[in-house]
Image (cartoon, coloured by chain):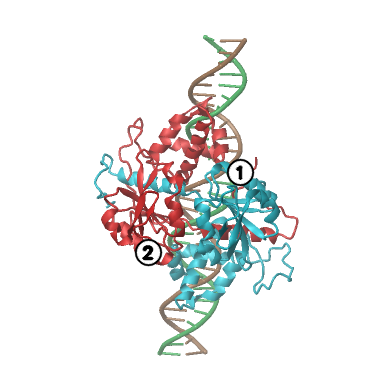
Chain colours: A cyan, B red, C green, D brown
Amino acid sequence: MSQATSGVGSGTGAAAGATTPSDFPDLPEATVARLPEYLRALHQLADTGHDTVSSEALAAAAGVNSAKLRKDLSHLGSYGTRGVGYEISLLIAQIEHVLGLTQRRGVALVGVGNLGHALAGYAGFGSRGFRVVALFDADPRLVGKTINGLVVRHVDLLVEFAPAEGVAIGVIATPASAAQAVADMLVAAGVTSILNFAPCVLAVPDGVDVRKVDLAIELQILSFHEHRKSAAGGAVAVGAGAEALPR
Amino acid sequence: MSQATSGVGSGTGAAAGATTPSDFPDLPEATVARLPEYLRALHQLADTGHDTVSSEALAAAAGVNSAKLRKDLSHLGSYGTRGVGYEISLLIAQIEHVLGLTQRRGVALVGVGNLGHALAGYAGFGSRGFRVVALFDADPRLVGKTINGLVVRHVDLLVEFAPAEGVAIGVIATPASAAQAVADMLVAAGVTSILNFAPCVLAVPDGVDVRKVDLAIELQILSFHEHRKSAAGGAVAVGAGAEALPR
DNA sequence: CGCGATTTGTGCGTGCGTTCACAAGCGCCT
DNA sequence: AGGCGCTTGTGAACGCACGCACAAATCGCG
């Protein structure tokens, strides 16, 4: 379908060793959000010795509908074999290429407090194509400290150091009151992708992507469903641990 | 988005009296996901001395479209005054009630490693209607340790202790390899809401809600957009991001 | 007391995302 | 070689969500 060439600038064959044609169909946003999950499931399958996988099995491993998975994969080309399934290694390579994970991206972490400290040591980043290359904080007691082999610099040096360190993505793990100022500094340093853990809305220029992760919001959404479940019967009193099961 | 969709189709049969504030219209899932953000914005406005707020101003503070906000709020009743706006304190009370935040819910945290330790000390939970009431881990070196006034118990005691502690929500911050076993234990302990930080898919019975937060996935989504931006060889100004927030 | 300014609540068109269902294609077995 | 079973890829229908635009409602003011 949209297999056709993207039309803009696809002729530059000098790209870094791409084994596959570097075309960028505009994937639906929902599909992009699921590709990492597929990738994780594929790695898991590869580790357990599998060689190929059907859409049904992969969908189960990723927790989605099989038709949805097939449509998602079809958006990035035909990499399956009818009657057989998908070759896992090929699919991994393709998804990693589309997500831009062939080059390891540098992450700057701003705010090395409670949460930020944990993120700095989170192994899941390094194992999935990212590397924390810089730490910043405003607290003088934290500046100069070494965490996971990286020294914490003062946040005022962000604009100075971030470009040289090859920072591609900025992570904000500061209190909400400082988040906007940090975002402004990241933007000034040329960062165009921000992951925000602070519970606040960030204003950024066009062209800068912001994703927000708010732990309390997740709990509140769960709370709603919990609340609804406990009130399902109408006048059911909350109390005993035994929950009324929905038939 | 919605995973483990339970068969909770049980409608509130007699919808006659809309005057009772304890009624639960089936809110669209997208609306539920935004209500916590509105709540946060409302608290922020209340702290700065505001008394009422227009949909336009509140929408700006929450980072959404004003029409969307009005429609969301209309789903939970008419709590605004035309020509004036919304009374902040009333709206806060109403949203907190709908989300079930009037009662403080207990949270059990399983996995007190790198990330779990940070979550145990995260102040954002307590300030928004939740309280960490129990910590569990499988590592003997961590069991018995005290974090934030709570003693870490061995995970095998989860089923025994969780109900007594009033646990309403379970948070999994273990490695992926242990997550499914922990989820099974939480379910066995009567927990019907789980927040999963482990990068894996959880299988749970119907009626149990699972929300997943995967930090690496967020980065990978950002990586895709970064990749696409850097490959836009032409003069194409990328601005179609899902969350562009001009100001 | 009536009018205009302002803001809510919502009907409707549009686009996206999901799901079903099936034709097309591939390998294997006879 | 040919048929058969299995799986992919996709057309089409459906439902949800979003945003526009406007009628209804309320307050303040002359």
**Residue bearing mark 1:** A180
Q: Quadrant where the N terminus of chain A lies?
A: bottom right
Chain under disc 2: B
Give x and y (percent) for residue B159: 28, 57
Give x and y (percent) for residue D3: 44, 83
Report how far apart the C-alphas of labels 2 and 1 lie in the structure.
39 Å
Give x and y (percent) for residue B98: 39, 39
Callout 1 environment at 10 Å: few (<14), some (14 to 19), or many (20+)?
many
Q: Does residue B134 show up?
A: no
Callout 2 environment at 10 Å: few (<14), some (14 to 19), or many (20+)?
some
Name the residue rendered at 49%, 38% in the picture: B71
Give x and y (percent) for residue A21: 66, 71
Q: Amino acid at mark 2?
A: Asp
Q: Nearer the viewer, residue B136 or A9?
A: B136
Q: Nearer the viewer, residue A73 or A111?
A: A111
Quadrant in which residue B129 is drawn = top left
Name the residue rendered at 50%, 71% in the picture: A43
Q: Residue B239's mark? A: none
Residue B102 vertical position relative to residue A24 in the rendered view, above or below: above
**Residue bearing mark 2:** B139
Residue B92 vertical position relative to residue A120 in the rendered view, above or below: above
Q: Are marks 2 and 1 in contact (CB under 8 Å)?
A: no
Q: Amino acid at mark 1?
A: Gln
Q: Does residue A152 show up?
A: yes
> What kind of element bears circle 1?
helix
2 or 1: mark nearer the eye: 2
> What kind of element bears circle 2?
loop
